[in-house]
Amino acid sequence: MRPASGYTARQTIEGVTIGVELFQGKDKIKSAFPKTDLEKVGVVPVLVVISNDNDYPIHLDRMRIELITSDRQEMDPTPVEEVLLPARVKPPSLSPRPSPIPIPGRGSRRPPKTNEIEERAFVAPVVEARSGANGFFYFRLGKGPDRLRGAKLFAGGLRNARTGQEILYFEIELRP
């Protein structure tokens, strides 16, 4: 993994650099997630790399990440446990109730559990002094017009661990 300063889309504030890489398109997504077709479920992964060049740690426990699309819609990341769930909820069936006797071979319709989504998710609560952290945030954009051209990633809520003072927010333009 490269340091945050090695990414084209990056910003540095008060000794903290955030680098961002958008994973868009089947081949690019497959390079990071070979077992999961995130494009099929309308999810775009965004790699976030944070480098702390200070002599003190940075708290991330209150960090907020948002994707600001080209049409200025603010989107929160999709929780990791919901990434593979269908985007739409089906209305309840009005057919008779199913038999209380279990039928072999019929189980829940939950998607298969893939650890690569959880393993690659951003989970660091702190970035130690002279260190870094990285991971993916997942955004459900669905299918339709390209809303990523000119989109930005907003990151706020990072705090100096010594003083508790919040670092100015980051707004990084994504480059597909």
Image (tube, helix red, strand yellow):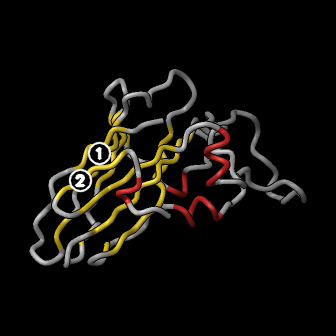
Residue annotated with mark 1: 154
Label 2: how many Cα within 10 Å (few below 14, some 14–19, many 20+):
some
In the image, taking residue 59 as reference, residue 2 lies left or right, namely: right
Which amino acid type is shown beneath numbered disc 2? Gly
Residue 51 left/right relative to 22:
left
Query: Which residue is more in the foreground, 145 or 104?
Result: 145
User: Looking at the picture, how far across and down is residue 40, in whole percent?
Assistant: 67, 38
Residue drawn at 79 percent across, 56 percent down: 107
Give amino acid for label 1: Phe
The spot of residue 89 in percent (x, y) is 58, 37
Using the image as rendered, state which of residue 143 and residue 126 is in the foreground.
Answer: 126
At x 56% / y 38%, what residue is drawn? 24
Instruction: Identify which residue is drawn at 57% across, 28% down.
Output: 143
Q: Quadrant of residue 53?
A: bottom left
Say which quarter of the image contains residue 69. Answer: top left
Q: Which residue is the site of mark 2?
A: 156
Indicate the secondary structure of the residue bearing disc 1: strand
Q: Is residue 160 above or below residue 31?
A: below
User: CB of mark 2 within 8 Å of CB of mark 1?
Assistant: yes
Q: Looking at the image, is 119 positioned above or below residue 31?
A: below
> Residue 148 location in percent, x, y?
44, 31
Q: CA distance from mark 2 to mark 1?
A: 7 Å
Left of 57 or right of it: where is 84? Answer: right
Question: How many numbered discs?
Answer: 2
Per the rendering, the mark at residue 105 is none
